[in-house]
Image (cartoon, rainbow, N blue to C red):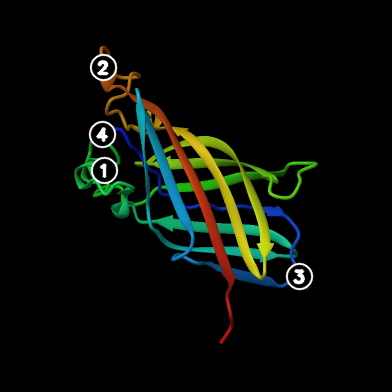
């Protein structure tokens, strides 16, 4: 078992360029079919990558600023890109993320800092957040890119977290000696691309 994943709720507050909203509050709904979350876990001599499904999410914009974003991912949908069902089952087990007891994880931002001098296609904000997995919370920071494309709000970014800080101990050299080639990296990489459509009022 050399693969890991994260599901999260993300809340963001910051300013960036949008069409004027006249100080009204606008809700964007995450497109769960076209938004993506990818994970990568590494071991000695290799790595594994996969996906997990987004359950629901919204982005709130007010006065040309993103004031909050929430994203929930279903931990039961952890998938390996090679379709290894044994691997997926192990990830859901108590060795890793205990999905039965912890079906969701969360990421809640505390600060959102604009990166000066960024160009087209570059990350334009740094996020400081509390990441909670298996009921354990630690602070993380990571860059994101936020922009609007043809009326669709796009949030792209990635982060790396230390899974041993969240009680995910299987194969970790932080807890076990003499693992040799069976050691699994504590670092788990997460990449996400979120697309959000403006919610229409009926």
Is residue 90 found left or right of 73 in the rendered image? Answer: left
Within 10 Å of the Cα at label 3, are there few (<14), some (14-19), or many (20+) other Cα atoms?
A: few
Within 10 Å of the Cα at label 1, are there few (<14), some (14-19), or many (20+) other Cα atoms?
A: some
| Residue 166 image-quadrant placement | top left
Within 10 Å of the Cα at label 4, are there few (<14), some (14-19), or many (20+) other Cα atoms?
A: many
Residue annotated with mark 4: 1
- Measuring 49% from the left and 35% from the top, which residue is drawn there? 160
Residue farthest toward the bottom in the current orientation of the protein: 202
Residue annotated with mark 3: 23
Residue annotated with mark 2: 179
Q: Position of residue 20 (x, y in %)?
A: 78, 70
Q: Position of residue 181 (x, y in %)?
A: 28, 19
Residue annotated with mark 1: 98
* Marked residue nearer the N-terminal end (3 or 4): 4
* Marked residue nearer the N-terminal end (2 or 3): 3
* Marked residue nearer the N-terminal end (4 or 2): 4
How far apart are the alpha carbons under marks 4 and 2?
13 Å
- Closer to us: mark 2 or mark 3? 2
Answer above or below: position of 108 versus 66. above
């Amino acid at each position: 078992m050399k693969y890991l994943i994260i599901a999260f709720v993300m809340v963001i507050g910051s300013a960036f360029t949008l069409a004027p909203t006249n100080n009204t509050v606008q809700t964007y709904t995450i497109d769960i079919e076209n938004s993506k979350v990818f994970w990568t876990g590494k071991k000695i001599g290799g790595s594994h990558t996969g996906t997990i499904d987004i359950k629901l999410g919204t982005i709130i914009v007010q006065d040309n600023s993103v004031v909050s974003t929430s994203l929930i991912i279903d931990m039961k949908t952890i998938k390996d890109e090679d379709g290894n069902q044994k691997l997926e089952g192990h990830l859901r087990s108590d060795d890793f993320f205990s999905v039965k007891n912890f079906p969701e994880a969360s990421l809640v931002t505390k600060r959102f800092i604009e990166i000066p001098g960024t160009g087209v296609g570059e990350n334009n904000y740094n996020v400081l957040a509390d990441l909670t997995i298996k009921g354990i919370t630690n602070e993380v920071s990571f860059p994101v890119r936020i922009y609007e494309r043809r009326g669709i709000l796009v949030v792209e970014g990635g982060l790396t977290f230390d899974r041993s800080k969240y009680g995910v101990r299987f194969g970790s050299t932080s807890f076990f000696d003499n693992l040799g080639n069976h050691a699994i990296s504590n670092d788990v990489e997460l990449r996400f691309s979120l697309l959000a459509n403006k919610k229409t009022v009926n």
